[in-house]
Image (spheres, grey):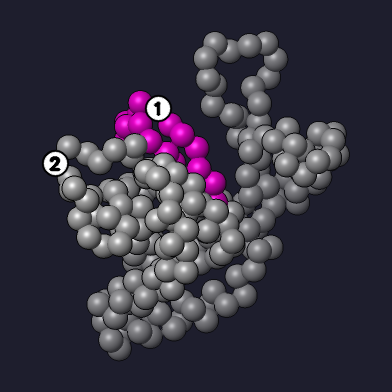
Amino acid sequence: MTAGVVAERLGISPTAVRRHLDALVADGEAETRDAPRRGPRGRGRPAKLFLLTETGRARFGHAYDDLAVAAIRFLAEHAGEDAVRAFAERRVAALVEPHRAAVNAADGPAHRAEALAAALTREGYAASTRQVGASATGAGAQLCQHHCPVAHVAAEFPQLCEAETEAFAKLLGTHVQRLATIARGDAACTTHVPAENPPGLQAKAPDGGERE
């Protein structure tokens, strides 16, 4: 996000925010990218987006990553890939099930995505949503997870990301598409949630049944 957005959310001056952000960049804990232009370009330099680097994300705690990777490697070697898949599904079910009622109470995929983002934020994923218009993936919402506590583990075991995507689809009652993941080196885990189900696709209701 931009320095201006950070300042607004924290309630401090943009000058103070930029001083802190410059320090993070100098320490290699953050980096900048030019914000994408929307509409005709105005005067001045393009706005800069600030995002965490791997070093910056490490501040959120990955103390058990090595142990987790070793444990899942052992599971794969001695019980096979199906066991890794089952573990990934069990883990994400434990993550989303406590929030099923709140997500189900929202009306439509976009509002359910907002409720899911709020739930994921409470679980430490710093999630948000934004509406998107016509694009390569169609209109709808993008669910962005700006932090992933298991990113280093998922880099070796993508089953964690795959199970999470499938769980999101079932919970939201619509087909979703994972566009980016922190585990693959992207700035955030981004999932596209369509405004409506694609033609010919019968969505599953959040309770597991079929929608009319």
Q: Quadrant of residue 51?
A: top right
Residue 92: horizontal and vertical position, in percent? 41, 68
As drawn, 89 above or below 137: below
* Residue sitting nearer the eye, 168 or 153: 168
Provide the residue designation for mark 1.
Answer: 133
Three-letter residue code for mark 1: Gly
Q: Quadrant of the N terminus?
A: top right
Relative side of 147 to 73, left or right? right
Farthest bottom residue in view: 78
Using the rendered image of the protein, determine whether residue 158 is visible from the camera's viewpoint. Answer: no
The boundaries of the magenta stretch are 127-143
Q: Position of residue 119 (x, y in %)?
A: 52, 58
Q: Nearer the viewer, residue 101 or 10?
A: 101
Residue 152, label in figure:
none
Callout 2, which amino acid? Gly
Q: Residues within 10 Å of mark 1 (few under 14, many from 20)?
A: few
Quick one: label 1 or label 2, which is nearer the N terminus?
Answer: 1
Q: Which residue is mark 2?
A: 200
Residue found 81% across the figure and 45% down from its top: 20
Q: Residue at x 30, y 73 (%)?
A: 85
Asked if the residue at tag 2 contacts the one at tag 1, i.e. Cβ–Cβ closer than 8 Å, the answer is no
Residue 61 lies in quadrant = bottom right
Q: Position of residue 74 (x, y in %)?
A: 38, 85
Residue 82 coordinates in the image, percent (x, y): 25, 77
* Badge 2 element: loop
In the image, 49 versus 73, the foreground residue is 49
Q: Residues within 10 Å of mark 2 (few under 14, many from 20)?
A: few
Residue at (29% x, 49% y) in the render: 174
